[in-house]
Image: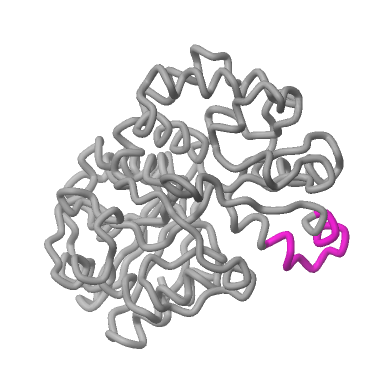
Amino acid sequence: MTPHSRLVMPLAALLAGAAFATQAAAEEVNIYSARHYDTDQALYDAFTEETGIEVNVLEGGSDQLIQRIEREGQASPADVMMTVDAGRLWRAEQEDIFASVDSELLDERLPENMHHPEGKWFGFSQRVRAIFYNPEEVGADELKTYEDLADPRFKGEICIRSSNNIYNQSLLASMIAHHGKDGAEQWAQGVVDNMARDPEGGDIDQILGVASGECDIAVGNHYYYVRMLKSDDEATREAAEKVQILFPNQDGRGAHINIGGAGMVKGAPHPENAVRFLEFLASDEAQAIFATGNHEFPVVDGVAIDDVLASWGDFKRDDLNVSVLGENNPEAVRIFDRVGWR
């Protein structure tokens, strides 16, 4: 594999255990990544330029990479696993994928709620689970919180993804943390009762549902909306411009935050390089790449961000430790099943 190259393996090859080519040189780090963003290459290039450590990348789905690391066992070349959503990081943690990392730099640079309590993984970018609405149908004073989504006055007006979507699982996990199991189940039932249609499609499809009039309210991650606003396709931009974004619960706990994160793999063949890579992800340079490449919010204050993100100004964010989202994931899935959220 050439330096900084990205080895993208098909599902069949991943599950069959195709060989992961690595270089013989000691100054390398092997990244297993479930982040599928072309702009992440800029992270790897910048790290190599700063440290001289070559980066080898294997991409796959989060569950596929977990299975691969388990199958490879002590012979795994993986040094770092990167993925999105605290729920997926928690799943890797439950399979004993990660080693604890003790880093003063990470402790200093990253907010406390972006740390796994034992240093098994860290959040390096933030993504808001926002509410989108049609301003011609929904007044700004009518809809202010996630809790409002369950209000019967919005019956038949909500578009939202399926319950097997990890982003929704983490949102419900946060509701468990704030309202308890019973309160979270009542909320989930209320959202189901208010759905305009059965859940289908991804986050962009929910926003398009609002733009087309299929529904008046949708839930999605903020960066999908930015992608639409910046799309080369005029129709996509026009659809996004019909929709307003709302950061909920500004008079209370703040908007729900999830993360893109990473941890060092247990038994990493290059542990020092793995820690250096994780520390690099907390640098101003890497944080700016997260913020401009995929329109995510940085976790470090004072870093330049995407112009659209900057135009939204400051807003309050839920400071719940993101590890709780993983811990509450199994109960969230059970609640979804009980209320019939497809």
Residue at point 36% right, 54% down?
A: 19
Looking at the image, residue 342 sits to the left or right of residue 211; the answer is: left
Q: Assign the N terminus to one quadrant of the image.
A: bottom left
User: Which secondary structure type mostly characterizes the magenta part of the structure?
Assistant: helix
Q: Assign the C terminus to one quadrant of the image.
A: top right
Looking at the image, residue 207 sits to the left or right of residue 301; the answer is: right
The percent position of residue 121, horizontal first and vertical second, equals 26, 53
Give the residues in magenta. Answer: 227-239
The percent position of residue 313, horizontal first and vertical second, equals 56, 68
The percent position of residue 51, horizontal first and vertical second, equals 27, 85
The vertical placement of 74 against 53, above or below, is above
The vertical placement of 163 against 229, above or below, is above
Near-viewer residue (331 or 255): 255
The vertical placement of 78 against 187, above or below, is below
Residue at point 45% right, 49% down?
A: 254
Q: Is residue 231 magenta?
A: yes
Near-viewer residue (209 or 136): 136
| Residue 299 picture quarter | bottom left
